[in-house]
Amino acid sequence: MEARVSLITLGVADLAAARAFYERLGFVASSASQGDIVLFQAGALALALYPRAALADDAHVAVEGAGFRGLTLAHNVREKAEVASVLAEAEAAGGRILKPAQDVFWGGHSGYFADPDGHLWEVAWNPFLPLDQDGALKLPE
């Protein structure tokens, strides 16, 4: 297997509401979106929204359970002050702030929001892992 993540799919309760939330944050739906799936280009990978029950069925797992999923998505920013402004954008779009922007133990600055379905997003400024011109996070070898 090649070390790569190509697509992240979020199971959502209301596809139209989830699509509207992400579009308010600036994501642009691809023309490949159709039926029960909405696709967004997200840098080098893609983000998909799909009905939660259908996603569970497709993976052959139970749909029950809504606690901590053991997964967070991250949106890294170029400047420390951007963390608070991105969190404010998420809140204005209908997200819920879980942790306001603050300095963190590892030397960066971050905060968390939950989208309308409870998916957790960290917004982080990491001075040790700067973004390239295209916004890609490139880890040192």
Image: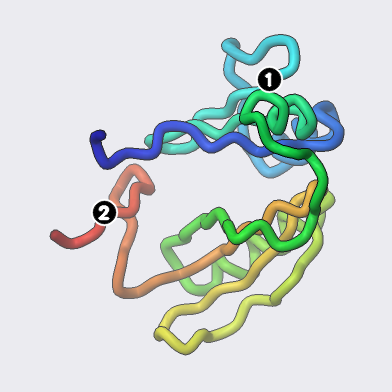
Tag 1 secondary structure: loop
> Residue at image x 26%, y 54%?
138
Q: Where 26 sits versus 102, above or below?
A: above
Query: In this rendering, does residue 93 appear at all?
Result: no
The residue at the point 80 percent across, 28 percent down is 15
Instruction: Name the kind of residue labelled 2 in the image.
Output: Lys
Residue on which disc 1 sits: 37
Residue 5 visible somewhere in the drawing: yes
Residue at 65% x, 67% y is 112
Say which residue label 2 marks.
138
Give x and y (percent) for residue 104: 51, 85
Task: Determine whether the residue tagged by mark 2 lies in a helix, strand or loop.
Answer: loop
Give the x, y percent position of residue 78: 42, 62
Residue at the farthest bottom position: 105
Instruction: Say left or right for 29 vs 125.
Output: right
User: Percent from the top left, x then y, of residue 90?
Assistant: 73, 55
